[in-house]
Image (tube, rainbow, N blue to C red):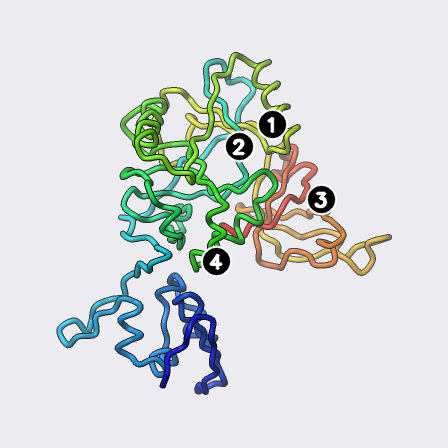
Amino acid sequence: MPDLQNGESVQVQGNSGIYTLRNEGGIYSCTCPAWLHQHAPTNVRTCKHLKAYRGEAVELSRVGIDNSPSRKETKSKSKRTSKTVAAALPITGKWIPMLAQIWNKKTDPTNWLMSEKLDGVRAYWDGRGGLWTRGNANRSNKPFVVPKAFLANFPPFPIDGELWLGRGLFQKTVSIVRRMDGNDKWMQLKYMVFDVVDETSGYEERMNRLSEWLQEHPTPFIEQVQQRICQGMEDLHEYLDAIIAKGGEGIMLRKPNGLYEHRRSPNLLKVKPMDDDEARVIGYQPGEGKYVGMLGALECEMPDGKQFNLGTGFSDAERDNPPPIGCLVTYKHQGFTDDGKPRCPVFLRIRTDID
């Protein structure tokens, strides 16, 4: 039986129906549940239908499984293709990033470092060949599948940053990085690096290490987030106003000699005109007046179990096709009421990059 050529597809009979096999740039896929529900990058997934059509030995070789008699129990390994690379080495345990606390006006920002808060997708470069999603105590890191050319000249030490396309383009960024095929749209992105993961040295020393590396190994896909020294409270507010006027979200304050900590750290503070948080959609309130037959408000649940309604910030299109129940949404608010619920919440976006 001839193999599938690039761009070709074929339908095969399965036990529960007819499935479609496809070859897109050397990445083979199947529409069967077994292939769709595998927790692995698409370039290393397989199923019995692909094995039957292409030949078991050929298919197992493609996904990196040694099927020789002495290695029958060998587990699947991520395969590097000529175009894409998934994480080459596993993370030991979980990488938990340093997260920001909310700036308290009682904290004098003088001599802290200021930078724009970017609305990108958090990513961790492990220094060994793998680019990973953000993790936490309950969620493991997952590998991005990235074009090899994008990762050329990345440093041999861990760095922390965000995949970024530009202001207001968060959803477009997510749509690029969530596709596990190393698509060419990655080449539109920049990895905006705001820290080097080193728990033993101060912030400026850490970033100087990255600067020295990039001077000798330039790459168009890494950019250091620009920092400036805050001259005081008035300077902070002027800088914040300038960022907001450009369509930005806010600013970050970093303690100059602060250490990297795998937690929500007082060495990193975020300053925004309004706070933002995430909540899970658990139901809908119907619209009234001009919104009859459309969404009136989302019924949302906070991480601590408190529930509230989120009824502003939606476009008419979003009211016609509201965020699905069970998804996470980001909203901004003006602090909390006495009973711990957000005050004046406003919908911002659906969060598809975190669970």
Residue 274, position as x, y percentages in the image: 63, 32
Q: Secondary structure at mark 2?
A: loop
> Residue 258, located in which quarter of the rendered image?
top left
Snapshot quadrant of residue 200: top left
Q: Earlier in the sequence, mark 3 or mark 1?
A: 1
Question: What amino acid is found at the position of numbered circle 2 in the picture?
Answer: Lys
- Mark 4 or 2, closer to the camera: 4
Residue type, label 4: Arg
- Name the residue at 47% across, 77% down: 9
Q: Which mark is residue 179?
A: 4
Report, in whole angstroms, how far the alpha carbon at label 4 lies from the one at label 2.
25 Å
| Amino acid of disc 3 | Gly
Mark 2 Cα within 10 Å, few/some/many (few <14, many 20+)? some
Disc 4 and disc 2 in contact, CB within 8 angstroms: no
Q: Counting residues from the N terminus, which is met first, the one under dot 4 or under dot 3? A: 4
- Category of crowding for the residue at label 3, using alpha-carbon neighbours closer than 10 angstroms: few (below 14), some (14–19), many (at least 20): some
Mark 4 Cα shell of 10 Å, populated few (<14), some (14-19), many (≥20): some
The residues tagged by marks 1 and 4 sit, at their Cα atoms, a distance apart of 30 Å
Q: Which mark is residue 313?
A: 3
- Mark 1, secondary structure of its residue: helix
In this rendering, the label closer to the viewer, 3 or 1: 1
- Which residue does the numbered mark 1 point to in the structure image? 243
Identified by mark 1, the residue type is Ile
293 relative to 128 in the view: left or right: right
Mark 4 → mark 3, Cα distance in angstroms = 28 Å
Q: Are marks 4 and 3 in contact (CB under 8 Å)?
A: no
Which residue in the protein does label 2 denote? 117
State the separation of the CA atoms marked 1 and 2: 9 Å
